[in-house]
């Protein structure tokens, strides 16, 4: 069972911040998941469409300037990091699951992963690129066909893991509320891994392991080390 720190170690530090990434690294996780959005010519590591829940700012992230986003408090004095800042911190020490939040992210992420391979000690095997935005994921696949893709769903698809296979994905990433034995078996029959979010309880992780799930995204990686 692979343990993937969700938004960094987001149960222990403000989500998607450099501190959350540093805590996950200190715990020795094999992989970190983070969310990226594109605004004012930069990739920002941030989950929500709006700024209010996780910062002292206001409005929709994608409409903001670089200076404004860089000025916000993301909790405990942390800033909203750029993807490059996170890459520089991690520097090839674990895998990164980069979740593309919305259109416009595929091209800059493709470019930045190449740059990080050249400058920061990453290899293509360090990345899994995931998204609920399947057209953006398909676009990414055309830009970097050498990287693994995670096809996200927040529901139980009508045809099981078929959509993930059609995307050429490496994994089907699904919600803990919907995963069942049939979906796990269908994903495996198609040669896909199956990863489940968000799992913070050891008892849930044990049940998923018995179901054959390959990995979990957790806000509390300390509970599984
Ligand atoms: O990638 C797993 C999980 O992060 C997907 O949902 O909303 O937490 O980005 P969300
Ligand atoms: Mg995510």
Image (cartoon, rainbow, N blue to C red):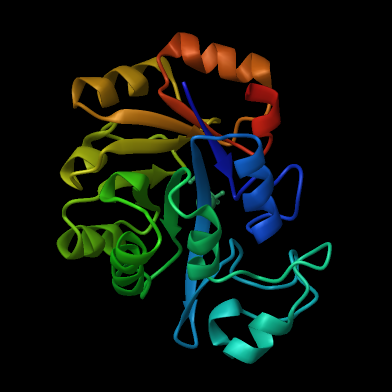
Q: Position of residue 223 (x, y in %)?
A: 70, 25
Task: Please name whichever residue, 49 or 93, is drawn nearer the observer in this view of the structure.
Answer: 93
| Residue 17 in sight | no
**What is the x, y in percent for residue 135?**
27, 62
- Where residue 140 appears, as percent x and y from the top left, is 25, 62
In the picture shown, does residue 56 fall above or below 152?
below
- Nearest the viewer among 159 and 209 is 209
Q: Residue furthest top?
A: 210
Q: Quadrant of the C terminus?
A: top right
Residue that lies at the very extreme toward the right in this rendered image: 76
**Total marks placed:** 0
- Quarter-wise, where is residue 25 in the image? top right
Residue shown at the point (65%, 59%) measured from the top left: 18
The quarter of the picture where residue 215 lies is top left
Q: Indicate the position of residue 51 as horizontal and vertical percent values.
A: 69, 73
Q: Residue at x 42, y 21 (%)?
A: 213
Residue located 68% across and 54% down the image: 15
Q: Is residue 176 visible?
A: yes
């Amino acid at each position: 069972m692979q343990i993937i720190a969700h938004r960094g170690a987001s149960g222990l530090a403000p989500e998607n911040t450099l501190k959350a990434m540093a805590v996950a690294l200190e715990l020795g996780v094999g992989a970190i998941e983070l969310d990226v959005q594109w605004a004012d010519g930069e990739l920002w590591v941030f989950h929500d469409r709006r700024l209010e829940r996780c910062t002292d700012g206001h409005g929709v992230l994608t409409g903001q300037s670089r200076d404004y986003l860089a000025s916000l408090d993301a909790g405990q004095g942390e800033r909203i990091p750029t993807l490059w800042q996170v890459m520089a911190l991690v520097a090839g020490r674990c895998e990164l699951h980069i979740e593309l939040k919305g259109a416009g992210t595929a091209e800059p992420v493709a470019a930045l992963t190449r740059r990080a391979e050249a400058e920061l000690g990453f290899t293509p095997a360090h990345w899994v690129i995931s998204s609920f935005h399947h057209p953006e994921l398909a676009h990414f696949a055309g830009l970097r066909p050498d990287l693994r893709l995670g096809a996200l769903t927040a529901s139980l698809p009508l045809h099981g893991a078929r959509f993930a296979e059609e995307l050429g994905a490496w994994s089907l990433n699904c919600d803990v509320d919907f995963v069942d034995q049939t979906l796990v078996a269908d994903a495996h029959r198609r040669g896909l891994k199956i990863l489940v979010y968000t799992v913070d309880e050891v008892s849930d992780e044990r049940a998923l392991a018995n179901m054959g799930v390959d990995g979990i995204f957790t806000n509390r990686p300390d509970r599984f080390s």
